[in-house]
Image: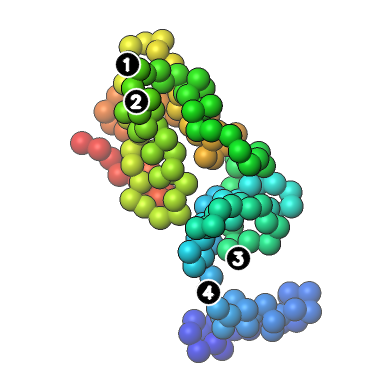
Amino acid sequence: MTRRSGAKSPSSESAGGYGYPLWKAQFEGPELPVYLRVGEHDDRLYLDLCDRDWRAVEIGPDGWRVIVNPLIRSRRTAGMLPLPQPEPGGCIENLRPFLNVRPKTDDPEDPRFVLAIAWLLAALHPRGPYPILGLSGEQGTAKSSFARVLRKLVDPNSAPLRSLPRRGPGLIHRGPQRARHRLR
């Protein structure tokens, strides 16, 4: 019997000869946080590229680099797609044509573009609170395309965007723990 849970240690036969080591790791081993796409350790962030080699981008005060063995553990869901390997150089302004955000004036610090970039950066942080992205505009103004581009930049996924149900009783809020609450 274990001291903590009351569960019995599995027999060697049931775990292919690894019964006691598996039991010891599960009940007496250290607990480590597991992250989804983005995690942190010390003063560094890690962005899982979701590729076959389990590479990640390590981001710190001195810059970034692609590494093979990140100091964090990541979990991957079935729909997660890989991110492309980042390349040095480039300019954030190169993103503007893909976001369909054009300045109303000649002001280079257009608030709409700045807000979009701020949302992207906040989405890449491992802990909340996270800002909610609200898009408004007339039909045909590329709101869904805008949302698809932003999602592909931070979390490419095989699942399509979802729209709100048309009727009140079908509205469901899904939080981080996938809790469901009816909205009144």
- What percent of the width, then of the height, locates residue 66? 66, 52
Label 1 or label 3, whichever comes before in sequence order: 3
- What percent of the width, then of the height, locates residue 94? 53, 27
Residue drawn where x is 47% and y is 46% of the image: 124
Quadrant position of the C terminus in the picture: top left
Asked which secondary structure carries label 2, the reply is loop
Tell whether 142 sits left or right of 110.
right
Residue behind mark 1: 105
Considering only vertical position in the picture, is 79 above or below 23? above
Label 2: few (<14), some or many (≥20) within 10 Å? some
* CB under 8 Å between discs 4 and 2: no
Label 2 or label 3, whichever comes before in sequence order: 3
Tell me the amino acid under the disc marked 1. Answer: Thr
Residue behind mark 3: 71
Q: CA distance from mark 2 to mark 3?
A: 38 Å
Tell me the amino acid under the disc marked 2. Answer: Asp
- What percent of the width, then of the height, locates residue 135? 34, 25
